[in-house]
Image: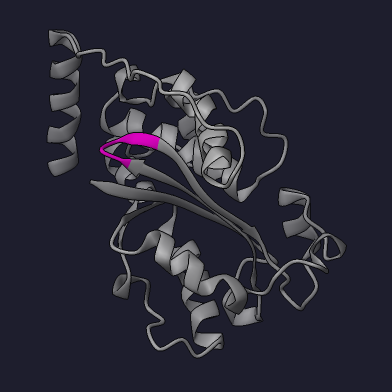
Amino acid sequence: MRQVVLDTETTGLSTSHGHRIIEIGCLELVNRRLTGREFHRFLNPDREIDQGAEAIHGISREDLETAPRFPDIADELLEFVKDAELVIHNAEFDVGFIEHELQLMKHPRPRITQHATVLDTLGMARKLHPGQRNSLDALCKRYEIDASKRDLHGALIDADLLARVYLAMTGGQTALWLDEEVAVAAPAARAGAAGGHAGHNFELVVIHANDEEIAAHEAIMRKMKS
């Protein structure tokens, strides 16, 4: 199963006010393991950024003057997410912005569902934790995901945190993570494929769940189906 965890940063809160995407970050999961493949771009929005939005993500208009525009990266993005399940927190927001950008460039297939399926982790969290705060920050605290290095919001940073939260919500096992040594080696392997030093081979360590972990997983899955 291939999934892509996706997040965006924007110039403001609403496409109806002409706001645009300024950053998009994606991380690939295959069979619930981070593969090391990612898609990350900053984008020139051709408009000013709201002060409130800039205070959240720290990206200024000046930072984006030489960045590509959405039409320049649209095909690459759609190829990356093609036939995957998109894992997004508050998917209505991010999907709405991406579809708005596709409509502005008059893309022949402007609906995300024409390229991938969508899983909204906010809706999932609300079912698992009704009446509680279910922001990404709140979920990181609830599932003990370390977000201490996140001073400001960022699309790739938040996609990484969301991947960890999603796996914790739906499995709760550290065995679901890609072996740390392999994850560190992934950039070097990509560099080797591009003509740099060859990557080393690493053996993936698989830790099987015990009876207690399996029971906890089954309980969570029953809640999700209810």
Vertical position of residue 118 compared to residue 215: above or below: below
Find residue 85 and report its image quarter. Answer: bottom left
Residue 72 is one of the magenta-drawn residues: no
128 sits left or right of 199 in the view: left
**Residue at the spot 30% in from the left edge and 71% down from the top edge:** 113
Residue 33 is one of the magenta-drawn residues: yes
Question: How many numbered markers are drawn?
Answer: 0
**Residue at the spot 12% in from the left edge and 9% down from the top edge:** 211
Find residue 126 and report its image quarter. Answer: top left
The picture places residue 178, in percent across and down from the top left corner, at: 38, 26
8 sits left or right of 64 in the view: left
**Residue at the spot 61% in from the left edge and 39% down from the top edge:** 196
Q: Magenta span: helix, strand or loop, mainly?
A: strand
**Residue at the spot 50% in from the left edge and 90% down from the top edge:** 106
The picture places residue 79, in percent across and down from the top left corner, at: 41, 66
Q: Can the viewer see residue 226?
A: no
Q: Can the viewer see residue 200?
A: yes
Q: Residue furthest right?
A: 62
The picture places residue 147, in percent across and down from the top left corner, at: 59, 28
61 sits left or right of 146 in the view: right
Magenta range is 30-34
Q: Nearer the viewer, residue 145 or 3?
A: 3
Q: Nearer the viewer, residue 166 or 105?
A: 105
